[in-house]
Amino acid sequence: MAEPSELLTAGADVLVAGGGNAALCAAINAARAGARVLVVEAAPKFYRGGNTRHTRNLRCAHDEGNEVLTGPYPEEEFWDDLMRVTGGETDEELARFTIAQSKELWDYMNEQGVRFQPSLGGTLSLGRTNAFFLGGGRAMINALYRTAEALGVRVVYEAEVVDVEIEDGFFLSATVSHGGTRHRIAAKALVAAAGGFEANIEWLTEAWGPEAKNFLIRGTPYNRGSMLRLLLDRGVRPIGDPKQCHAVAIDARAPKFDGGISTRLDCVVFGIVVNRAAERFYDEGEDFWPKRYAIWGRLVAAQPEQIAYAIIDRTSIDKFMPSVFPPIEAASIEELAGRLELDPAALRHTVESFNAAVRPGSFDPAALDDCRTEGLAPEKTHWARPIAEPPFYAYPLRPGITFTYLGVRVNRRAQIVMDDGKPSANMFAAGEIMAGNVLGKGYLAGIGMTIGAVFGRIAGREAGHHVRN
Amino acid sequence: MFATEDHAEADRLMRICNACRYCEGLCAVFPAMELRRTFLDGDLNYLANLCHQCGACYFDCQYAPPHEFAVNVPQTLSKVRAGSYRAYVWPQAFAPMFEKNGLAVALAAALGVAAFLFGFMAWSDPGVMFSAQHGEGAFYRIMPHAAMAWLFGLAFLYAIVALTMGFRAFWKDIGASGEAVGGGSLWQAVKDAGRLRYLDGGGVGCMNEDERPTDRRRHYHHATFYGFLLCFASTCSATLAHYLFGWEAPYAWYSVPVVLGFVGGCGLVVGPLGLFAAKTRRDPAMADTGRYGMDVAFLAMLFLLGVTGLLLLLLRATPAMGTLLAVHLGVVFAFFLTMPYGKFVHGLYRFGALVRHAMERRAGHSVGEAAG
Ligand SMILES: Cc1cc2nc3c(=O)[nH]c(=O)nc-3n(C[C@H](O)[C@H](O)[C@H](O)COP(=O)(O)OP(=O)(O)OC[C@H]3O[C@@H](n4cnc5c(N)ncnc54)[C@H](O)[C@@H]3O)c2cc1C
Ligand code: SF4
Ligand code: SF4
């Protein structure tokens, strides 16, 4: 095995920036097309594959069910789902193309050694549309690395692209920083697959304002958007709104970065959510939680100090998926308020007026039931039951950013489009760094990996062809 | 609150895993965990014994060290498992026998018994002991069959009693006593144990030196386990031949006891060697290094059982037979005696855990719908 610095000076035909799903799909396909491929991943080996490490599934269209996917998911249905969540903010050509290509992903991933399993406990509603990785995203990305290395792809960790040299839309070289040394790497093609900028708090602050400093970042601390910024500064056409991101409400006790899936909280629909003033601010029972969790990040972000508290009682404590941090527990509402440093009288008032507004109904977590309040602002429209049985429990909530949508414009050959509208001949992009082309807003579970794999494969193939011609 | 620090750590990990669940498809541990929201010592001992230490969940975990959650399920469950052997041992006073000096104890016992037998036999009839013996009853001219049967029968009986008591304590602690064990669950567990279904990292093989899976450990374990069973069957068939038909050992090359013993003996030589080699190459991050002695002692005893048995078979017509017989019997005796106090118990508790898991699956339930 050669030293990383030797690998960096040896040069390559195709330079891949990033080390996640999109980067590895590109590296594998470029190597299959006959190119010498070098992957530079900013993170250390354990953290390779940034947010891909945290994923659990990918969405793919298919005409028939199989041993894992429980039924057909036709392209049209995928398209309808995408239209629903984006409200039409998508590039129709690229979106339809992505969906059509997603049909190949099941076989493709299996060929690369990725293994699947039926949907995880608690996610049955995704069993038909999403293929779950056996062992999760890290198992998946480990498989891609094994395949890539077997194909001769060379990988250097802790190697960040810090500069790129572009002339008239043509990539000449990249500067890679590794172990304190800067290496200039001239390659015949570049694949930018270095994720979004969600871990860059300063950039988030630029877009969101000072609230952003209270956001938690669910994924890797290494997705700081340095590649994206370089490209945008060197004449690449942007796509998407810097303020758009996938933000969910997660446990406020989660680590600042990299808390991943286990910090999610699914208790909101079973109780009430209050802010620092101990006041409710949104209908907790508007819809099933998997359909609503992604709006709660923004809702909490809009509250003072970007924090809120979900409050439930004994009757609901075992109704949702267990979460990683234990609930804050108290024998009375006042005591609970004390623990949360909220005004006890205010919290008591909020709980009491909520309890008084609850109409009788038959509670059914599996349906949009008839348990609701009457005469409250805001109402709780489903699953409203009085919070009266001690012990009382609270979970603190903060906005958790999954990923950002601002990216680089691409065409269906995954070529990066320059400011003048012309596609670059030898620069390609895949994954989160270009997801905004397909996903202008909203989110569809599993589509991040779909976009990364579809465009990663194409970017790799196109880059490979480019260097051979 | 928990019996040991290892239990407290296992509880911490199971709470993280229960909120994550990505490893659900890898083995039985995670589905069993999902049936619970809180974990008592007994639950953790159950999960620990259900774990086959394949290592997949360590390499697949996004929270493995150096992540601040520092999730290392194989290592932690391995520690809890070793602790459970001590916790359930009968009599309790023998718990320290599981400690690091396992190999020394086992070897000392084997050598001691071998020396005793050697001395006993050589003293009672040196002429027979050091000359080649042939034909029916050749072994028993060196040591009378009745003495052999009594001695080993008693040692075996003791092992069975001690193992049963340990198992009862385990079964009670994991909350299974009092529940009806269906034939279906038992059969399921026999199949799962027989195939080592959960030593395959969810289908690709277990992880040993790095994240590249292999199936080596499973194959060597099969060689060991089935080798052991064949040797046991060989002994049983010989006992039957002796008492039912009055045929006396040594038996012919093509006889059932010899063929079983030969094939089994080979398994017991190859299997433990392979497992030991895999152990030395294993990524230490996954392992509980504190139990190395116990693990190695068990492998060594199995290997010695196989080697001495095979040598006895090969050299039984030479003057070395007497000495080899003493050594082989010494090893067998020591094996019986140390069975309840060494790694042997892992098979028992793991099988119990598999039965329990099969029972739970039949009555399974799950909670809620999660968001991404
Ligand atoms: C907790 C969580 C769960 C998720 N679950 C799912 C799911 O189940 N399904 C799904 O489809 N999506 C999921 N997503 C979204 C998904 O993770 C992303 O859409 C996807 O991983 C993006 O892949 P990528 O290859 O573009 O980026 P990443 O996998 O994030 O890889 C980008 C890599 O680029 C590296 N990098 C950054 N800058 C540079 C630089 N300048 N030079 C070199 N390297 C650089 C980073 O270190 C990083 O490893 C989840 C996200 C999170 C946070
Ligand atoms: S071992 Fe890691 S990836 Fe697997 S379930 Fe536990 S926390 Fe999740
Ligand atoms: S080491 Fe293997 S058997 Fe043990 S819990 Fe992890 S995946 Fe399951």
Image (cartoon, rainbow, N blue to C red):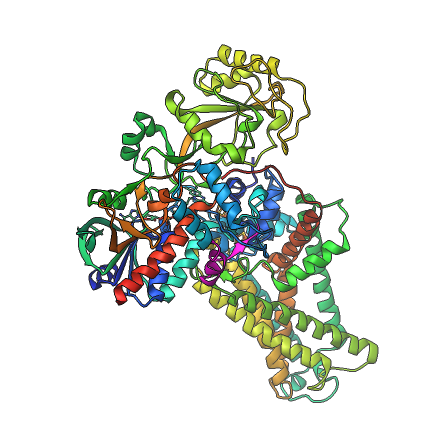
- Tag count: 0
Spot occupied by residue B81 in the image (x, y as percentages of width and height): 57, 51
Looking at the rendering, in which quadrant would you find the N terminus of chain A?
bottom left
Q: Is residue A406 above or below residue A22?
A: above
Q: Position of residue B135 (x, y in %)?
A: 72, 89
Q: Residue at x 52, y 23 (%)?
A: A283
Residue farthest along the right direction in this orientation = B244
Q: Is residue A111 magenta?
A: yes
**Residue B119 visible, this orientation:** no
**Magenta segment range?**
A102-118
Q: Is residue B272 inside the magenta stretch?
A: no
Q: Quadrant of the C terminus of chain A?
A: bottom left
Given residues B23 and A95, the one toward you in this image is A95
Q: Residue at x 75, y 86 (%)?
A: B136
Q: Residue at x 36, y 42 (%)?
A: A436
- Which is more toward the observer, B218 or B258? B218
Residue A427 as seen in the image, left or right of residue A453: left
- Whether residue B61 is visible, yes or no, is yes
